[in-house]
Amino acid sequence: MADFSIPLGYSFAGLAAGLKGEGLPDLGVIFSDRPATAAAMFTRNRVQGAPLQVGREHLAAGAIRAVVVNSKNSNVATGPQGVENCRRVCRSAAAELGLVETEVFPSSTGVIGRQLPVEKLTSALAGVQSAQRSDSAAVERFAAAILTTDTRIKIRSRAVAGGTVLGVAKGAGMIEPNMATMLAYILTDLELPAGDLKPLLAAAVDDSFHCATIDSDTSTSDTVLLLANGASGKKISTADERAAFEAALRAICVELAREVVRDGEGVQRIITVRTTGALSKEQARMVGKSAANSPLVKTAVAGADPNWGRLMMAVGKTFDETIQADRVRLWGVDPADGREVDLMSDDEAVLAELRRLMRGSEVIFRIDLGLGSAACEVWGCDLTKEYISINADYTT
Amino acid sequence: MADFSIPLGYSFAGLAAGLKGEGLPDLGVIFSDRPATAAAMFTRNRVQGAPLQVGREHLAAGAIRAVVVNSKNSNVATGPQGVENCRRVCRSAAAELGLVETEVFPSSTGVIGRQLPVEKLTSALAGVQSAQRSDSAAVERFAAAILTTDTRIKIRSRAVAGGTVLGVAKGAGMIEPNMATMLAYILTDLELPAGDLKPLLAAAVDDSFHCATIDSDTSTSDTVLLLANGASGKKISTADERAAFEAALRAICVELAREVVRDGEGVQRIITVRTTGALSKEQARMVGKSAANSPLVKTAVAGADPNWGRLMMAVGKTFDETIQADRVRLWGVDPADGREVDLMSDDEAVLAELRRLMRGSEVIFRIDLGLGSAACEVWGCDLTKEYISINADYTT
């Protein structure tokens, strides 16, 4: 059932360290059989996890050979002991895999403020060599090990320029990525210079994870990592190859970002907000985020309530002084055929049509600001009682 | 049961125009037997209701003699017809009360995007003269007429400097006031020059409604109006009197703002966030708002889940670069005795104590940024399934 391809030179494991419960995978490992150039983007939250500090140090030290990710505990707000615990896990993985400590890139996701159970993690890592595989099942075990409240694994791939790009992500709550998403790992067997990776990744993330929001809460652990190990023997050299790689990378990031939202906590419907007629892409994104994050828009979508006035409220609460209320127009968009319905009316037929559109699994609004020609699409989700059930007793 | 005092020279009515259903009060009127100096603050939302445009014009024209407020329909996003409808209601009230049109201050609250049912309102206004009273029951009928999803009326008063100050407010959703709250009317029979009213009101609102949030959605209709008709024969002239009036005005605004939050949609617990050690009051308010508006903090409080890590996340997601994660400290505060519990621990005893504090009707957190000496207190509320029930089918 796997409909993804695996780049050459990488192997995967999903180990059971006992954090999620007996035998459940909760410790994911990616291993590259040769050094990979690497670039990463991290959360802009001013409170950041210990693995983000250690990961930055290891990226600065040079090539990456392995990624080690545990779920259930994010190792955030754990002080100097949290940093030392993260280093101990990296050292343990390096010893098992025959690497040096700085070749291991660490991540952790889960509850904030608890010390990492290091012994459980290092015990599980003792079995990593024998567990590593390069098949689809191993990728899926890795993808499962990094999940928290997600309900399904998130994997996408593209063949490009004689090589392969594979992306694996997780994230289901505390999601309004800012500089990165919860956790996403993108691997390619193409060869790319380290200096090229960062701008390519930044552009792709800006058009994907930065347009997604589940609950407006920006995590302390958001990380997107891109590794290029060159195992395919193909090197990205021409402008055409670079453009093709960039497109593949962006497509994978967009699909993973939308998949993260679709699997958001308690999500019943995803909300796509297309903002057009803006003065800049940033303005369009700000308006789209304001609508997609508004509790009143989200609950209206949950209830398929055709209360389009809440979209007007959300446009206005950006407090952007260039926005002119009398230029704003709103449409509902039918996902089936792209047909648009002008919403600014109290006609019963319009409300009935909007109600019908809002009963679908994807609800699409277009907001036109009537100011310029810039646009941006933002993906959010409805706010349901299930989100509250999931989050009202997360730690207990 | 009324525990408020009524300033001299004002009378009140709560008329039934048939907007809420047969016989229910939905059209509130305040009348002053002499011209009152007036000041108002309005929402900063870039989309604003027709009554806000007309209200600004009438304030600019001079003294105010009457306030006319309907619920169920906010007259927002209704174009030129909405403005004309608002003027028709003002003209009708002026004719019934023997005033000129610009002496009437209009407000509307309710659903956005529907034209005002003007005939129903003008028909009801035909009975206003005979309905106006200066007793407690009339004030309570006025307070009831302006409610939407609120569950109770909100009235506060203070005796000060030989006169009386009375405040009446409403608001239960779409509440993160910015420059004003949903609707609040503050009346005094003291005499104050028109030029003094605005700075006094601005200072009181900044310390009260601007520190309250129910759902981070800023309404298109927020209005706070202050009227001073001088009917007590007392004039605020000395610095002491001015200070006493300022304190009374602030106290009423704070009590009304907290009461608005306490009666917020689906609210089970109110959340008070005291931010200390900030570089400025604005920084402290921003941090407090970030915590009080975080869906993950709000759901944790709903479930009495001692997940203090979410407060750390909320501090960090302000993206304020002056904030240093390792200087941030968190406390839970016992409302009974003010005792503080240091939360940054994974000790079971601390978590148990926090769980106990979170089961109360008011949950108080203190966040110290360790940067300076400024502070601000913000009032928010938990996010419950009831909020979603109320908002998933508001118009239908």
Image (spheres, coloured by chain):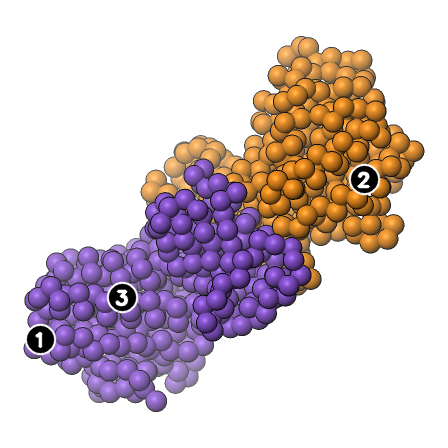
Chain colours: A orange, B purple
Would you say B389 lies left or right of A185 here?
Answer: left
**Based on the displayed image, in which of its 4 quarters is residue A240 positioned?**
top right
Badge 2: chain ID: A
Asked if marks 1 and 2 fall on the same chain, the answer is: no
- How far apart are the two marked residues, 1 and 2, measured between alpha carbons? 78 Å
Badge 3: chain ID: B
Foreground mark, 2 or 3, reads 2
Instruction: Determine if residue B215 is in view.
Output: no
Would you say B146 lies left or right of A290 here?
Answer: left
Picture coordinates of residue A219, whole percent (x, y)? 59, 45
Q: Give the residue at mark 2.
A: A122
**Based on the displayed image, in which of its 4 quarters is residue A56 positioned?**
top right
Q: Which mark is residue B234?
A: 1
Q: Give the residue at mark 3.
A: B250
Residue visible at 8% across and 75% down in the picture: B234
Q: Residue furthest bottom?
A: B1
Confirm or deny contact between disc 2 and disc 3 (CB under 8 A): no
